[in-house]
Image (cartoon, rainbow, N blue to C red):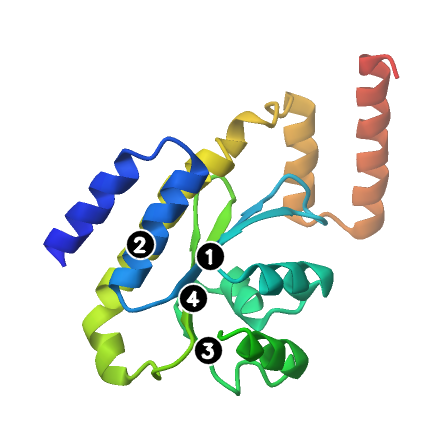
């Protein structure tokens, strides 16, 4: 693993764009026996509607179909990835609630897959998926390649999040002392009505200060 990881890291370090970096991730995936790979980055720019960026080596037809059908919202691998950093292997059971997506993916040659998500201190989530058209992912292969697959997922996130997402913490202005106080009141669990009134009053004062 050390020699392979060193070679992949050397190529990643030399990448000057997200496309170049992803090409090196895809090459690393092929060296591990996977025809395709995809990386998705979820940016917490909005709590209710986060932005997701996707790079993949899937066939163009599947990329377009995935977006057209809105499969990002129902993809069970994504649902798993938002809750856990543990890898997940594609299976009929995993996709039992998304049978149409599973059938269509398989029609594009995406029959065997593995995915792992990564989380960072800036609130970003990245997920790397490795896929191929045949040859079942056996327990023996998983045991042999698991450290390298996890390593590739983590370094894909470290590299591509930097290219695609920047530092999210710098986007948000620091909270004022009053805003911090309101958040502390909420965290302390004040009764709902009291908390609501207090927040309304605080917000009104902040608006007055801002001259709104």
Identify the residue position indicated by label 4 in the image: 115
Disc 2 secondary structure class: helix
Q: Is residue 103 above or below residue 147?
A: below
Query: What is the CA distance from the residue labelled 1 to the residue labelled 3?
Result: 18 Å
Task: Locate residue 129, reporting x and y percent.
Answer: 43, 63
Of tags 4 and 1, the one toward the viewer is: 1
First in residue order: circle 4 vs circle 1: 1
Badge 2: few (under 14), some or many (20 or more) residues near its Cα, within 10 Å? some
**Tag of residue 27:** 2
> Residue at (67%, 64%) from the top-left corner?
65
> Residue at (86%, 25%) from the top-left corner?
204
Foreground residue, 158 or 206? 158
Query: What is the CA distance from the residue labelled 4 to the residue labelled 1?
Result: 15 Å
First in residue order: circle 3 vs circle 2: 2
Disc 1 secondary structure class: loop
First in residue order: circle 4 vs circle 3: 3
First in residue order: circle 1 vs circle 3: 1
Of tags 1 and 3, the one toward the viewer is: 1
Q: Quadrant of residue 12?
A: top left
First in residue order: circle 1 vs circle 2: 2
Disc 3 secondary structure class: loop
Foreground residue, 72 or 192? 72
Identify the residue position indicated by label 3 in the image: 90
> Residue at (42%, 69%) from the top-left corner?
131
Badge 4: few (under 14), some or many (20 or more) residues near its Cα, within 10 Å? many
Identify the residue position indicated by label 1 in the image: 57
Q: Are marks 2 and 4 in contact (CB under 8 Å)?
A: no
Badge 1: few (under 14), some or many (20 or more) residues near its Cα, within 10 Å? some
Query: What is the CA distance from the residue labelled 3 to the residue labelled 2?
Result: 21 Å
Task: Locate residue 208, reporting x and y percent.
Answer: 86, 16
Foreground residue, 196 or 102? 102
């Amino acid at each position: 693993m050390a020699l392979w990881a060193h070679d992949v890291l050397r190529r990643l370090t030399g990448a000057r764009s997200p496309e170049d970096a992803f090409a090196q991730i895809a090459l690393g995936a092929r060296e591990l026996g996977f025809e395709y790979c995809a990386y998705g980055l979820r940016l917490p720019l909005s709590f209710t509607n986060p932005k997701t960026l996707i790079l993949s080596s899937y066939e163009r037809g599947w990329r377009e179909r995935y977006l057209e059908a809105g499969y990002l919202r129902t993809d069970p691998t994504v649902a798993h990835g938002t809750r856990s950093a543990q890898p997940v292997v594609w299976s009929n059971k995993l996709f039992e609630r998304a049978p149409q997506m599973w059938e269509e993916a398989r029609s594009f040659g995406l029959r065997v897959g593995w995915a792992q998500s990564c989380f960072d201190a800036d609130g970003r989530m990245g997920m790397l998926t490795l896929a191929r058209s045949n040859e079942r992912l056996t327990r023996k292969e998983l045991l042999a390649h698991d450290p390298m697959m996890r390593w590739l997922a983590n370094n894909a996130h470290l590299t591509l999040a930097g290219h695609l997402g920047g530092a999210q913490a710098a986007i948000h202005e620091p909270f004022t002392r009053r805003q911090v106080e309101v958040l502390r009141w909420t965290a302390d669990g004040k009764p709902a009505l009291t908390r609501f009134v207090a927040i309304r009053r605080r917000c009104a004062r902040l608006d007055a200060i801002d001259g709104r």
